[in-house]
Image (cartoon, rainbow, N blue to C red):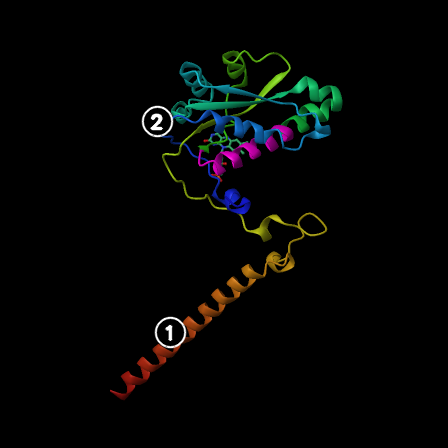
Amino acid sequence: MELNETIKKRRCVRRFLDKPVEWDKVSKIIDSARYAPSAGNIQDWRFIVVTDKSKIAKLSDAALEQRFIEQAPVVIVVCSDIEKIKRAYGMRGEKLYSIQDCAAAVQNMFLTITDLGLATCWVGAFDEAKVKQILSIPEGVRPQAILPIGYADEQPKMPLRQELYAITFFDKYGNRVKDVDAVLGKWGKVMEREVKKEAKTISKKIKKTIKKVKVRLKKKK
Ligand SMILES: Cc1cc2nc3c(=O)[nH]c(=O)nc-3n(C[C@H](O)[C@H](O)[C@H](O)COP(=O)(O)O)c2cc1C
């Protein structure tokens, strides 16, 4: 799949088929995480692959009873070795880089999962203490994300995305330009919008003319 297509096709899926995931695919998913950037190349991420049904059920409980997790044949729990990153970068390493490093790894995995024709959902809402206990995660290691992986049993529509102009500022925070697509040279988008605008104006003109003609015809009667 082409990268841009994979990025746009990626969806959080919360229904999985009762179908196993091939092992070579699981290793490809984790392998892709290794290529993510990490602060100082510390690579503080750690991955726990869970296939034990009873443990997956417990993880589902720990994730505030998000029951769809139980449908997944494989669950990957992404952890950060906080001690490792803290040694290198202190507080900033612990509170910020550890999260960013794991998030970068998760996104790589998510895109690979999509590319392999599989599906997942980024699960961040869970009781950390419970997850640590279920998986015997030691002190100094923090579970950051749960990825239930399987074959999709639904095709969710893309939830609404904010427009580029609403989230992009120029030179200072809050400084918006109305047509950010034009500034960024996205001429296809600009043309599309202009064509739509033109089509709207023409349709309004046609409606007005029809109205006028109808009035004239009435008067003639
Ligand atoms: C940090 C983070 C935590 C999330 N936690 C959950 C979660 O606990 N349960 C869930 O169903 N979805 C969770 N999501 C998924 C989001 O709801 C989802 O990404 C968002 O609605 C956009 O949908 P999309 O991923 O299909 O584009 C989480 C996403 C992120 C990035």
Q: Which residues are magenta?
A: 100-118
- Pointer 2 residue: 18
Q: Is residue 164 magenta?
A: no
* Local SS, label 1: helix
Question: Is 60 located above or below residue 108 in the figure?
Answer: above
Question: Is 173 located above or below residue 92 in the figure?
Answer: below
- Pointer 1 residue: 207
Q: Residues within 10 Å of mark 2 (few under 14, many from 20)?
A: few
Q: Position of residue 201 (x, y in %)?
A: 46, 71
Question: How many angstroms separate mark 1 from mark 2 (CA)?
Answer: 54 Å
Q: Quarter of the image containing the C terminus?
A: bottom left
Q: How many marks?
A: 2
Magenta segment main secondary structure: helix
State which tag comes first along the sequence, 1 or 2: 2
Q: Is residue 116 magenta?
A: yes
Q: Position of residue 11 (x, y in %)?
A: 46, 39
Choose mark 1 or mark 2, whichever is in front.
2
Q: Position of residue 169 (x, y in %)?
A: 66, 50
Taking the image as shown, residue 132 lies to the left or right of residue 151, namely right
Whether the residues at callouts 1 and 2 have beta carbons within 8 Å, the answer is no
User: For residue 188, which quarter of the picture?
Assistant: bottom right
Taking the image as shown, residue 36 lies to the left or right of residue 155, namely right
Q: Residues within 10 Å of mark 1 (few under 14, many from 20)?
A: few
**Furthest-left residue in this view:** 221
* Local SS, label 2: loop
Q: For the residue marked with disc 2, what is the amino acid?
A: Asp
